[in-house]
Amino acid sequence: MILANARTVTLSMNKMAKDKTVYVCDHCGQESTKWLGKCPSCGQWGTMKEFHVQSEKPSSAVVRAAMQAAGAEGKRKNRPQPVSEIRANEEPRIDMMDGELNRVLGGGLVPGSLVLLGGEPGIGKSTLVLQTVLRLQNQRKILYVSGEESARQIKLRADRLSSTGEPTSLLILTETSLEEIFRHIGEIQPDLVIVDSIQTIQTETVDSSPGSLSQIRECAASLLKYAKTAGGVSIILIGHITKEGTLAGPKVLEHIVDTVLQFEGDQHYMYRILRGIKNRFGSTSELGIYEMRHDGLRQVTNPSELLLSDNREGLSGVAIASAIEGVRPFLIETQALVSTAAYGTAQRSTIGFEGKRLNMLLAVLEKRVGFKLAQKDVFLNIAGGLKVTDPALDLSVIAAVLSSNVDAPIEGNVCMAGEVGLSGEIRPVARIEQRIAEAQKLGFKRMLIPAHNLKGINPHDYKIELVPIKKVSEAVRELFG
Ligand code: TYD
Ligand code: MG
């Protein structure tokens, strides 16, 4: 760290004449005039990276040239206008011809917006964008800029993806220089520009290597300026993030762009989840689910059916929860394994569920229901590689842990939803009707729900038997007799 610091100082001394050097946290985007070991805003160590700001704003020159070429500047002179004259009708949206993507975007792509699609390498970002633009190619003029793959590679992939005939009008440009890209944008005047990936693009105005923080920020800022001024051109940036979610880039980019979508999933599962992290034009609670196939990503419209395994009957340590992520309910399989700790301290490990919350639930079980789990290893897994934050999962976590602990399976046609409080009470959950309807649709016969939630609903409206629960101990009695 000290070494890096020394290097940065020498660098900035050499350039002091024309540059201002600032340090930007690549975790949260906090800026500082001097290097700091710990970011004062997010508290992360070693995340402050050097960033040169040049005195004469060179990026604007590049963008201006492109906009002039595009004839955009005259088209849209910016000036103050009375609020009464601003038209506030619905933002026009571009239909991406992909239900999942449209929903996560908040009803389609907004013309003139800058969207960042982030995700780990190899998760399927290029595939998602390419298959989308192939569907759109005959309606809009689309330029797909790739700094990652050769034109031939993209063509091979496009052939594999397009089930609906030849890719025809889509334009592919393999280029990494921002100035060149703007030159082509100026000539072609596309409606939609894809940049795959922002880490590979570099501008001459910043003399650091591609992928560095200053390059990424400068390039993104120029693209943003273009999107905002060039009358309705939307830009989709693809950005890689590492496992830790850092690396120079997307975290800092989040402040610049309008919409941040994250594509996540486990390389070993075929499910991919598209999540809105930030959206100036819609809600961020939306979720899109895809399945990676040999011929591209397929939309998953009924996730529950995919997430539940068929042969869970008779297995201990499995409980089904009716969860809601975004606005969609789906049934999720919670799996737990409880075994005697082999070494002194017991292990607690979770996949797809927050570890601290598991510890809290185990403490509730110990204190309120009298199960001794301190000497036991507890492993918890949400099936399908999903990450779930819905508190209604608590009850199924407790049920799965107990089921594994006493090695007694829970009946296959039973599911549940309920948040567990510190005193062992079952707290009500949001949108219970939707959860019940989804469970019923999938053929479940009984559902444990918080007693409080029974108030607003009529149990006779449902074919599924609803079992109201007030305390964890009641749930235990209900499930294990
Ligand atoms: P890719 O879109 O290149 O990922 P990213 O742009 O996020 O780095 O896709 C990576 C993986 O997807 C690759 O390992 C192969 C797999 N894949 C399929 O399974 N089916 C397909 O149709 C395509 C195009 C890729
Ligand atoms: Mg890619």
Image (cartoon, rainbow, N blue to C red):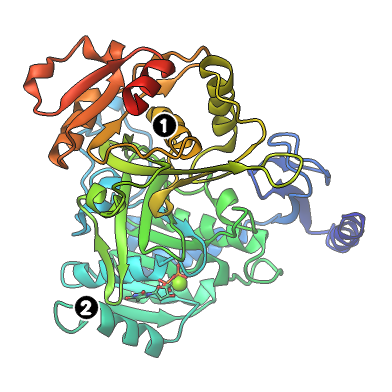
User: What residue sits right under mark 1 in the picture?
Assistant: 399
Q: Measuring 34% from the left and 60% from the top, which residue is drawn there?
A: 72
Mark 1: which secondary structure?
helix
Q: Measuring 48% from the left and 80% from the top, which residue is drawn there?
A: 175
State the image quarter where residue 135 is shown: bottom left
Callout 1: few (<14), some (14-19), or many (20+) C-alpha neighbours within 10 Å?
Answer: many
Residue nearest the viewer, comparing 332 with 178: 332
Residue nearest the viewer, comparing 143 with 129: 129
Callout 2: few (<14), some (14-19), or many (20+) C-alpha neighbours within 10 Å?
Answer: some
Q: Position of residue 282 (x, y in %)?
A: 32, 38
Point out the frontmost of discs 1 and 2: 1
State the image quarter where residue 327 is shown: top left
Quadrant location, the C terminus? top left
Depicted 118 relative to depicted 409: above or below: below
Depicted 105 relative to depicted 477: above or below: below
Q: Amino acid at mark 1?
A: Ala
Q: Measuring 37% from the left and 83% from the top, which residue is drawn there?
A: 154
User: What residue sits right under mark 2 in the picture?
Assistant: 162
Q: Measuring 56% from the left and 59% from the top, which residue is drawn there?
A: 241
Q: Is residue 460 left or right of residue 394?
A: left
